[in-house]
Image (cartoon, helix red, strand yellow):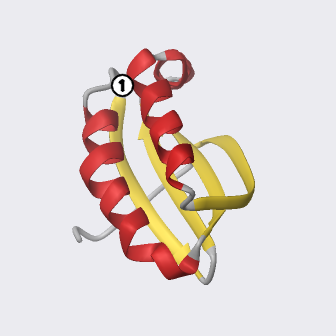
Amino acid sequence: MLTRLWTTEFDVDRRSELERFANEISRPMFEQMAGFLGYIYAVSDAIWLTQTFWESEADIEACEKSPVYLAVVDQLMSTGLVVGNQSTAIYQVAGSALPDV
């Protein structure tokens, strides 16, 4: 299993809008992607983290090239919610124990 971490700065005054976008637009988009296993959204001050879990690197690459994914990214960027620096990293999951939330 792999995890993909996308970290960005965001407009803290619009946090509720970003949470709504993540839950109502991003999550359903990810859920239709092959190999998608789950997600975590996390926030600290003006930093937003989207952590997704995948079966393979090929699944991540296919998602990132998908017209549906690219349209959601364009839609998010056009909102002005995301500001400043962004980064993406992929890691092999070495272990986990998460509660149901």
23 or 81: nearer the eye?
A: 81
Residue kind at label 1, given as amino acid type: Gly
Q: Residue at x 38, y 23 (%)?
A: 68
In the picture, measured across the screen, residue 63 lies left or right of residue 35, that is: right
Position in image of residue 47 (x %, y %): 63, 71
101 or 73: nearer the eye?
A: 73
**Up/down of 3 relative to 41, above or below:** above
Q: Residue at x 33, y 20 (%)?
A: 34
Q: Is residue 70 visible?
A: yes
Q: Residue at x 34, y 36 (%)?
A: 30
90 or 31: nearer the eye?
A: 31
Q: Is residue 93 visible?
A: no
**Up/down of 56 relative to 89, above or below:** above
Q: Residue at x 47, y 74 (%)?
A: 14
Q: Which residue is mark 1?
A: 35
Mark count: 1
Position in image of residue 90 (x %, y %): 65, 39
- Provide the secondary structure element on which disc 1 rests: loop
Position in image of residue 48 (x %, y %): 56, 66
Position in image of residue 80 (x %, y %): 57, 57
Find residue 40 and report its image quarter.
bottom left
**Up/down of 74 relative to 96, above or below:** above
